[in-house]
Image (tube, rainbow, N blue to C red):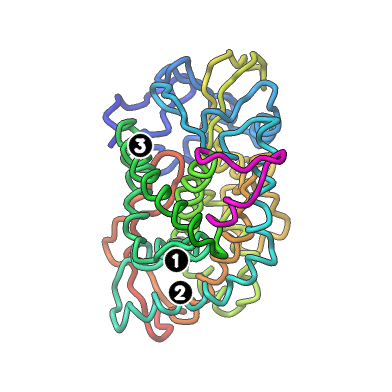
């Protein structure tokens, strides 16, 4: 929980952990844009910057001369970062660290996972049984990507609750509590060291075994490199996708016209998914200023932290007509939900597939649903924003 003083002037004292931001960041960005293209804050060590335009966020994402990825989270105090390559890597180390991960997440490999993803979705929905009220986030959205990542990494799905606990403690508790992150990282390292040792003795067809075989410049990956990559995949590869699935279900539960249209026009779903990704982009990253520069008239001082909000880029009216509206038939949609530049999400093909399949199977079973009366939907704060709870009431027939 954020116990800091509330924000009174977002232009010079922003705090992305403030409850106002967590509940509705869009209103904050809209109010700032006309007069303040880059907000600042001294709440964070060495100061922090919040660019709000698509063009500035794009420029920073591509500028490795002035901005480093060695710090990917804006924190009150800078703490030593234990690398999670390739996301914390800068050139020249970044390119080979990313390249080795491209084959496992290529479109052909993702396509092989679609039948399993559909089976997982059907199984989760069948587990709901005849209940008409349940939590679509906890019982569905948050489970789909866990199962798929277990398959990719060759992990026991029985450990799913452990992974969910790590994600919660990292992305919720760890937002303010550095010690919580250290403890979780230690637990994850122990777990994955055991998995690595098992693969060394008995290699399989999974991602961990693959990482033990690949090389960078003729050298095998160090154990530290492998551990960092596995930590990245289990944290970033799950929470982001379940947040996107959950946000999509929340949107349809609160926008009955869009729900009816998708049920009537299922072929529109891929286009709608792109719009859900734009409108409810889950990921906000960070950079550290390593060389002084200026954007939109704002000087960025060396050492400062930059909140790189891809969700804000996606709501920029200078880039997207009717940016504040969710248009499920938006034809031209160059959104930044998967990031920009060299760190663009390498799992984007997987995330899209999981979202489409999860929503297809949901709509087949529940063509009519809404939020439960009086339901309170809570959204996560920090690096990944998504609905942690989506209490729904479903109808077996279209009656609402």
Query: Residue 374's image quarter?
Result: bottom left
Quadrant where the image shows the C terminus = bottom left
Q: Secondary structure at mark 1?
A: helix
Can residue 341 be seen by looking at this rendering? no
Between marks 2 and 1, how big is the CA–CA gap?
A: 7 Å
Is the residue 204 above or below the residue 96 in the image?
A: below
Q: Name the residue: 58% across, 32% down.
A: 52
Is the residue 233 above or below the residue 272 in the image?
A: above
Q: Name the residue: 55% across, 72% down.
A: 357
> Which residue bears the numbered disc 3?
181
> Which one is nearer the viewer's eye here, 31 or 204?
204
Crowding near the residue tagged with mark 2, few <14, some 14–19, many ≥20 C-alpha atoms within 10 Å: many
> Which one is nearer the viewer's eye here, 113 or 292?
113
Q: Position of residue 78 (x, y in %)?
A: 43, 22
> Which residue bears the numbered disc 1?
147
> Which residue bears the numbered disc 2?
120
Is the residue 230 above or below the residue 7 in the image?
A: below
Residue range (magenta): 208-224
Between marks 1 and 3, how big is the CA–CA gap?
A: 23 Å
Q: Is 153 left, or right, of 393 in this rendering?
A: right
Query: Residue 356's image quarter?
Result: bottom right
Task: Check if mark 2's residue and mark 1's residue have beta carbons within 8 Å.
Answer: yes
Q: Closer to the N terminus: mark 3 or mark 2?
A: 2
Q: Is 334 left, or right, of 273 in this rendering?
A: right
């Amino acid at each position: 929980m954020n116990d800091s003083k509330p924000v009174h002037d977002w232009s010079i004292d922003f705090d992305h952990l403030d409850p106002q931001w967590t509940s509705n960041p869009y209103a904050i960005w809209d109010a700032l844009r006309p007069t303040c293209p880059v907000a600042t804050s001294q709440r964070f060590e060495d100061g922090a910057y919040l660019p709000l335009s698509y063009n500035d966020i794009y420029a920073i994402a591509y500028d490795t001369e002035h901005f480093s990825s060695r710090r990917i989270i804006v924190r009150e105090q800078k703490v030593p970062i234990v690398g999670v390559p390739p996301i914390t890597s800068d050139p020249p180390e970044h390119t080979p660290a990313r390249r080795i991960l491209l084959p496992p997440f290529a479109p052909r490999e993702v396509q092989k996972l679609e039948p399993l993803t559909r089976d997982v979705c059907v199984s989760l929905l069948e587990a709901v049984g005849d209940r008409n009220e349940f939590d679509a986030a906890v019982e569905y959205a948050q489970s789909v990507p866990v199962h798929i990542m277990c398959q990719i990494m060759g992990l026991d799905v029985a450990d799913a609750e452990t992974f969910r606990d790590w994600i919660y403690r990292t992305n919720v508790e760890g937002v303010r509590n550095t010690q919580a992150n250290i403890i979780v990282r230690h637990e994850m390292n122990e777990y994955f060291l055991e998995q690595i040792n098992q693969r060394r003795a008995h290699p399989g067809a999974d991602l961990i075994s693959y990482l033990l075989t690949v090389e960078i410049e003729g050298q095998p990956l160090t154990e530290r490199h492998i551990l960092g990559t596995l930590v990245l995949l289990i944290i970033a590869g799950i929470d982001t996708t379940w947040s996107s699935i959950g946000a999509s279900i929340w949107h349809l539960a609160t926008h009955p016209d869009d729900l009816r249209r998708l049920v009537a026009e299922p072929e529109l779903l891929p286009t709608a998914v792109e719009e859900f990704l734009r409108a409810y982009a889950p990921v906000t990253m960070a950079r550290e200023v390593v060389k002084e520069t200026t954007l939109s008239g704002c000087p960025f001082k060396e050492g400062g932290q930059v909140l790189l909000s891809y969700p804000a880029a996606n709501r920029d009216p200078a880039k997207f007509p009717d940016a504040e509206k969710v248009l499920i038939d938006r034809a031209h949609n160059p959104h930044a939900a998967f990031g920009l530049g060299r760190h663009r999400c390498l799992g984007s093909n997987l995330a899209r597939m999981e979202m489409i399949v999860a929503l297809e199977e949901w709509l087949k079973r529940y063509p009519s649903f809404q939020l439960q009366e009086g339901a309170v939907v809570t959204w996560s704060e920090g690096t990944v924003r998504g609905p942690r709870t989506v209490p729904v009431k479903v109808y077996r027939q279209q009656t609402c």
